[in-house]
């Protein structure tokens, strides 16, 4: 169970917006994916949770940036 507010917020945001972004695609390309590894972290500690939150936030930035149109005027 995720107990940190940032993790919970990011997962909720992904769950809410995923169907919207998926239905907005018209080019049939694969959705961007970023794997966040937590196997080396102890998520029962504050440091482990903070490290995971940073990794998750960085992955969200990469995935969301990949989904933005770059050719807008």
Image (spheres, rainbow, N blue to C red):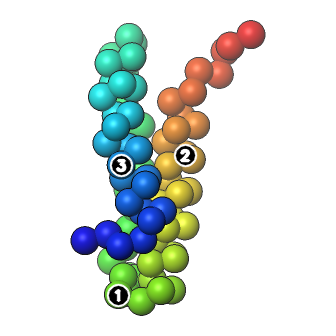
**Percent position of residue 47, x then y:** 51, 86
Residue on which disc 2 sits: 62
- Residue at (32% x, 18% y) in the render: 23
Q: SS for tag 1?
A: loop
Q: Give the quadrant of residue 38.
A: bottom left
Direction from residue 62 to residue 26 in the image, left or right: left
- Residue at (33% x, 77% y) in the render: 39
Q: Is residue 72 visible?
A: yes
Residue on which disc 3 sits: 12
| Up-down relation of residue 56 to residue 28 (above or below) | below
Labelled disc at residue 44? 1
Closer to the N terminus: mark 2 or mark 1?
1
Q: Give the quadrant of residue 18.
A: top left
How packed mark 3 is, by other alpha carbons closer than 10 Å (few <14, some 14-19, many 20 or more), is few
CA separation in Å, label 3 and label 2: 17 Å
**Percent position of residue 44, x then y:** 35, 87
How packed mark 2 is, by other alpha carbons closer than 10 Å (few <14, some 14-19, many 20 or more), is some
């Amino acid at each position: 169970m995720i107990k940190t507010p940032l993790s919970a917020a990011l997962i909720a945001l992904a769950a809410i917006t995923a169907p919207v972004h998926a239905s907005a695609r018209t080019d049939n390309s694969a959705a961007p994916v970023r794997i966040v590894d937590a196997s080396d972290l102890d998520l029962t500690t504050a440091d482990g949770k903070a490290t995971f939150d940073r990794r998750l936030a960085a992955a969200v930035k990469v995935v969301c940036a990949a989904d933005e149109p770059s050719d807008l005027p």
